[in-house]
Image (cartoon, rainbow, N blue to C red):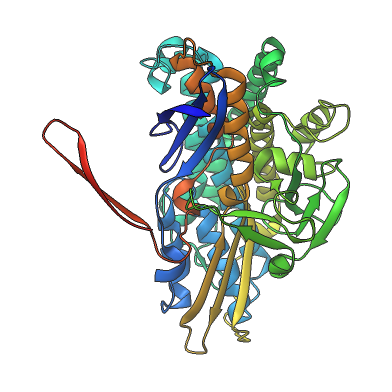
Amino acid sequence: MATQKITIEPVTRIEGHAKITVHVNDDGSIDMARLHINEFRGFEKFCEGRLLSEMPQITPRICGICPISHHLAAAKAADQVLGMTPPRPANLLRELMHHGQIIQSSGMHFFELAGPDLLLGFDADPAIRNVIGMAEENPELTLKAINLRKFGQEVIAILGGRRIHPTFAVPGGVNKTLSPKERETILADLEETKKTAQLGIFIMKGWAERNHKDIDRFAVFPTGYFGLVNPDNQLEMYDGVVRLVGQDGNELVKFAPEDYLDHIAEHVENWSYLKFPYYKPMGWPDGSYRVGPLGRLNMADSIDTPLAGQDHKIFKTLNGGKPVENTLYYHYARMIEVLHSIEKIEMLLQDPDIMSTDILNTKENFQGEGVGCLEAPRGTLFHHYRATEDRRLTMVNLIVSTGHNNYAMCKSVDMVAKEYVKDHGITEGMLNRVEAAVRAHDPCLSCSTHAVGQMPIVIDVIDKSGETIQTFSRD
């Protein structure tokens, strides 16, 4: 029977708010550990009644770290609602911005958020286990990391006018062309950015070699793997069809994003605002899967850019050709994707159509419903809208990347706590490993949290000494 509860609050170096509770038995063993997503975001409901055209500007406000993902997914959904297929140059420009987002977000996570654990150590003094400590330990690497993120942000700013919450994608296309000078500005920093991504992969490989025992005991478990692919089952970040492979790596299903509700359902637990998506035919929890870098690299057969493609081949050998189940390899997969995005930007800039002025389709064929889907840095993102002919939204459904990974995050927290936390001599480093189980997934909790039914409210009345004297709740 659990007699002690340890609370880790807040979980640090993630986007959003969460806490972890670790329940300890009398003998010092861990009974269970839970990840609690304790913030509420009501975007789905308060977007109802808004104009469809506003969604590419409203939904990015869900998050300041991955606003581009919501901006583009909203625009893709609006394209379908209005029946306005963007011209090819517009799609190329949208994809260019999207890869800038992946570089800035995933690059930042690897170096600035996960990096202190990997490069300074899980047991390092928390006073220095942060980006400031990183800068003091290795200023040259830290500068390279900052410039990597800066490159991704500059791609966004060149296209959208600003780095955060740009006004670029609109129903039917985009509202700005790419000039020759802007193209050259991006190309000028491409090689140095590529070297930094390759350095990140080199660092991760070295860390993995030195810490393989930890990798093999840190939340290793089977799931399905989920993401977008092109017709050749290659990694696709902006467009494509959804592919789900099982625990053995064999394909379970492939479907158009518009059909997601035929295949995905959401489980609810009363201790979290975050839902648990799963594959319907297998039920809950057997149908749970992982998304994001680890999910995508397990799911895709190959990558269509040369450098990232070669590293993906190496990644595929880590578990003897079977899916890689080790949670800490999320970091390795993440940097392979950063390198892939840099290579994709180079390919996109070499496409003559990207300089075209044919960037907007204004001809409508109103459909009333649409689904926008892409691969955000953290995983597959769905925006699903219904609207009336006067362009007012009647339904908004968002299944956000972090939501797909909810089962995996909760499973990881429980496994890591049971593996590393010992009641007889609990250390801060032990608890940091439990946080790192969440951090590996790079969650964006502001994006993903919703409530089912009535939102619970708890009010604690506390006296001058800090003691709780009365609690009122609405469940």
Residue at far bottom of view: 389
Which residue corresponds to the image point at 65% horizontal and 15% vertical from the top-left?
207
Location of residue 322 with respect to 209 vertically, above or below: below
| Count of marks overlaid on the render | 0
Which residue corresponds to the image point at 62% horizontal and 74% vertical from the top-left?
370
**Among the 4 quarters of the image, the one containing residue 8:** top left
Please state, as top left, top right, bottom left or bottom right, where the C terminus lies in the image: bottom left
Residue 62 is situated, as x and y percent measured from the top left of the image, at: 43, 55
Taking the image as shown, residue 190 lies to the left or right of residue 247, namely: left
Q: Which of 137 and 157 is in front in this view?
A: 137
Taking the image as shown, residue 179 lies to the left or right of residue 191, namely: left
Q: Which of 6 and 148 is in front in this view?
A: 6
Residue 13 is situated, as x and y percent measured from the top left of the image, at: 44, 31
Taking the image as shown, residue 126 lies to the left or right of residue 105, namely: left
Which residue corresponds to the image point at 49% horizontal and 45% vertical from the top-left?
444
Residue 145 visible: no
Residue at far left of view: 464
Which residue corresponds to the image point at 51% horizontal and 52% vertical from the top-left?
274
Q: Nearer the viewer, residue 467 or 442?
A: 467
Taking the image as shown, residue 203 lies to the left or right of residue 250, namely: left
Residue 51 visible: yes
Q: Nearer the viewer, residue 107 or 92?
A: 107
Residue 320 is situated, as x and y percent measured from the top left of the image, at: 88, 27
Residue 68 is situated, as x and y percent measured from the top left of the image, at: 51, 53
